[in-house]
Amino acid sequence: MDLETLQHRLDALRGYLDIAGKESRLRELEVKLNDPHLWDNPTEAKAISQEATRLRKAVENYRRLESDLQGLLELWPELSAEERAQMQPELDKAGRELEDLYHQTLLSFPYAENAAIVTIKPGAGGTEACDWAEMLYRMYTRFAERHGFKVEVVDVEPGAEAGIDLAQFIVRGEYAYGLLSAEAGVHRLVRPSPFNAQGKRQTSFAALEVMPEVDESVEVAINPEDLRIDVMRSQGKGGQGVNTTDSAVRVVHLPTGIMVKCQITRSQQKNKELAMNILRSKLFEIEWKKKQEELARLKGESRPNEWGSQIRSYVLDKQYVKDHRTGEMRHDPENVLDGDLENLVWAGLEWKAGRRETVAVGDEE
């Protein structure tokens, strides 16, 4: 990357990062951090400290890059062609750092830094769809592992013949919800079927739901009288590690009909805590979406119904993966299904941030 391109990217990044706004907010937070009574409320103090740390890191990184590039710009006219070539590794490093900062701007929405609660459900299609749901389950757990995230399984229900009827898990790590948020939607698989002798081409669908995990610091009203809590024996395919005690917990929120089941641990109390945490997050998400829709209505905005929309196709016999929102294309589906999703994830987040137009693309079939 050349110096002029780096400078243009840095200038554009200043607007995306809102450096002036971050510095102003940081000054406000530092006043609060110097208040000796701040830690009387540890939850609030922790949130303020974490926000200040994130802002300080973004501002300092930007200012350091700005200073480095300014120094290079002043020095550049005096350098020989050979000296400029020797500086190329420094320019490449600055380019990577600028890209990292740009990615941070795509993760600036509410709760992006939270853990992600991911639910995968097969669509119509019986065994084929259940198998596809299990492939997606593996793909996203592999993606999490590649990022050093922790995956906490809540519930996995096996399909009647193969695959899964449901998988629900929590991904814990830095910006886990932020990274996975744009992956929500319907995923489509096209392949020669491994479940019939003729190997006929089959299309299967599975839905991915992603929501931020919220803890008790986020106020969500749950009336105990609105809950039905059942304890049951867990279900599984058998084998080592299967929970065989009567510790599975199902929590039903009667007013909304939301049902959460957790059967992954041998502790009934732990399963109940996990189920209640997911219920709290689901109820919070419902109210949050209502508020966002109301704000959009008041502003006169037209928002697409993203829930349930087909976002991506994985066409194995043609060796491609295509995102229907961004036009992003891959010709190595085996790597994608092994969790190599970087460019697809970032393109989806650009689309979510309104920096990519929805691309009308058809399948290459």
Image (cartoon, grey):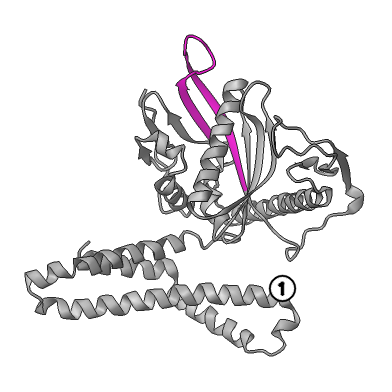
Residue 33 figure quarter: bottom right
Residue 28 figure quarter: bottom right
Q: Residue 221: horizontal and vertical position, in percent? A: 82, 58
Compared with residue 306, is residue 132 higher up or lower down, i.e. above or below? above
Q: Residue 299: horizontal and vertical position, in percent? A: 58, 57
Give the quarter of the figure containing the C terminus. top left
Residue sitting nearer the eye, 294 or 78: 78
Magenta-highlighted residues: 187-210
Q: Residue 226: horizontal and vertical position, in percent? A: 89, 48
Query: Is residue 195 magenta-colored?
Result: yes
Query: Can see residue 227?
Result: yes
Farthest residue in the front direction?
240
Instruction: Indicate left or right for 76 with 272 as reference.
Output: left
Q: Residue at x 39, y 63 (%)?
A: 100
Farthest residue in the right direction?
225
Instruction: Indicate left or right for 173 with 278 as reference.
Output: left
The residue carrying mark 1 is 43
Residue sitting nearer the eye, 288 or 53: 53
Badge 1 element: helix
